[in-house]
Image (cartoon, helix red, strand yellow):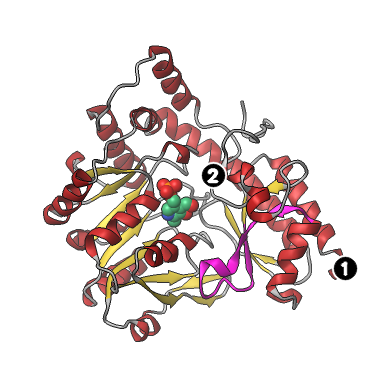
């Protein structure tokens, strides 16, 4: 099966397709699901083979973080990101949304605050709020065709109650890859303000040719005692539904605090998740991940060309991630008008920019991890929905 083989995801308990009518009023019968961040094609053959072997074995008893699983994670971080980790730094959670919630739980108290740099993955703010903590938004600054840090402005927004800084690298949305200098500056900013740095690198493998991702731990190794790194194979290999993500914690005290919380909550890894990750983080998995990026690059280029042809609409050039970040401010339309046209005329379910916080007001986020024919269809629907601007 290739990245372009059509696949019907309806009636598979898929959040993206089976909940889109309820959440977005776009029918999966004639609409396109371009919102939540998973992909519309199957995972790597090496992952499927490992899973099939497990299914054929037929026994699904208790599992643990096997040496094969831990070694595969360590291998991937070294081979793909030049980051040497020890396997006992790895803790397993039910995905990174869950990991962020656990960090808030362990390292802050109700009424404390957490800083985030917006626009950013909307769940950062939601997790903070649901935990009874307060969000401190530090807006990124638009410069040229991307975002940059404004740490002076960020400093002025801190209230002194921030215990955590939740950082996204590469940035979702916008696909910005942070430079080593920027990463060092963020880590120093966290330390200076007594915030524990939670560094979410879930999109670190989804990097387009011509760009290179720098892991926070590689850029700022001296900050390892004040940083919790979050990584996962879920976006790279489209296995988010198996609910397995990692916290990588070098500092013994921080790790002991989190391990104790995981033990008290009786966290156990999913045996199928462990099996899939051990298979994904492999040389075969790496070849598949590279092929996926070539496919995504085709999609990104077609999407950008088609969207940028609509007067007043502009797709931010992505360095990483498969999440197109589109600015409608040049149309002069309100967010509601843009949202209505995309929903009712184009019949596409997309993620609304304002949910990503300050800076997202005039944007919409489009998931491009699908068949190229779907991207072409989406572009044509968008051009028709905004044809009066032509
Ligand atoms: C930056 C970021 N962190 C975390 C998540 C959620 O990860 P998980 O599915 O492992 O909970 C996402 C999903 O889109 C994301 O973009």
Task: Evaluate whether residue 25 shows in this view.
Answer: yes
In this picture, residue 354 sits left or right of residue 212? right
Check the picture and name the quadrant holding the N terminus: top right
Q: Give the percent coordinates (x, y) of residue 363.
A: 63, 68
Pointer 1 residue: 388
Which quadrant would the C terminus be assigned to in this image?
bottom right
On the picture, is 124 further left or further right than 318? left
Residue 121 visible in the picture:
no
Displayed quadrant of residue 364: bottom right
Q: Secondary structure at mark 2?
A: loop
Instruction: Specify the segment rendered in magenta.
Output: 346-365
Q: Position of residue 204 (x, y in %)?
A: 42, 50
Q: Quick one: label 1 or label 2, which is nearer the N terminus? A: 2
Q: Can you say whether 253 is above or below 376 in the image? A: below
- Confirm or deny contact between disc 1 and disc 2 (CB under 8 A): no
Left or right: 145 with respect to 63?
A: right
Provide residue 99's location: percent of width, then percent of height: 33, 52
- Position of 7 with respect to 129 (left or right) is right
Within-10-Å neighbours for mark 1: few <14, some 14–19, many 20+: few
Residue at 60% across, 47% down: 297
């Amino acid at each position: 099966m290739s990245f372009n083989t059509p696949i019907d995801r309806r009636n598979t308990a898929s959040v993206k397709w089976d909940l889109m009518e309820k959440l977005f009023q776009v029918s999966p019968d004639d609409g396109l699901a371009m919102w939540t961040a998973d992909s519309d094609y199957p995972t790597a053959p090496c992952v499927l083979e490992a899973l099939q072997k497990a299914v054929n074995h037929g026994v699904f008893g208790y599992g643990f973080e096997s040496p094969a699983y831990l070694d595969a994670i360590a291998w991937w971080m070294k081979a793909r990101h030049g980051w040497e980790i020890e396997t006992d730094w790895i803790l397993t959670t039910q995905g990174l949304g869950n990991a962020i919630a656990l960090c808030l739980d362990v390292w802050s108290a109700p009424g404390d605050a957490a800083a985030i740099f917006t626009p950013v993955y909307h769940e950062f703010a939601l997790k903070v709020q649901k935990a009874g903590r307060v969000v401190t938004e530090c807006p990124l600054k638009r410069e040229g065709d991307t975002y940059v840090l404004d740490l002076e402005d960020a400093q002025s927004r801190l209230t002194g109650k921030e215990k955590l800084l939740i950082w996204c690298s590469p940035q979702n949305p916008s696909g910005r890859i942070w430079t080593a200098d920027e990463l060092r500056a963020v880590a120093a900013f966290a330390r200076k303000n007594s915030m524990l740095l939670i560094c979410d690198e879930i999109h670190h493998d989804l990097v387009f040719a011509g760009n290179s991702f720098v892991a926070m731990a590689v850029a700022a190794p001296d900050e390892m005692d004040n940083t919790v790194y979050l990584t996962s194979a879920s976006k790279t290999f489209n296995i988010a539904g198996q609910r397995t993500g990692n916290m990588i914690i070098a500092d013994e005290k921080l790790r002991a605090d989190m391990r104790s919380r995981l033990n008290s909550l009786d966290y156990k890894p999913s045996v199928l998740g462990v099996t899939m990750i051990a298979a994904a983080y492999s040389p075969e998995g790496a070849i598949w991940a590279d092929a996926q990026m070539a496919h995504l690059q085709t999609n990104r280029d077609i999407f950008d060309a088609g969207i940028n042809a609509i007067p007043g609409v502009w797709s931010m050039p992505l360095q990483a991630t498969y999440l197109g970040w589109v600015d409608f401010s040049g149309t002069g339309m309100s967010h509601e008008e843009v949202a209505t046209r995309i929903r009712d005329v184009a019949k596409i379910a997309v993620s609304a920019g304002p949910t990503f916080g300050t800076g997202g007001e005039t944007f919409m986020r489009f998931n491009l991890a699908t068949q190229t024919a779907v991207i072409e269809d989406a572009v044509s629907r968008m051009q028709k929905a905004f044809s009066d601007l032509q």
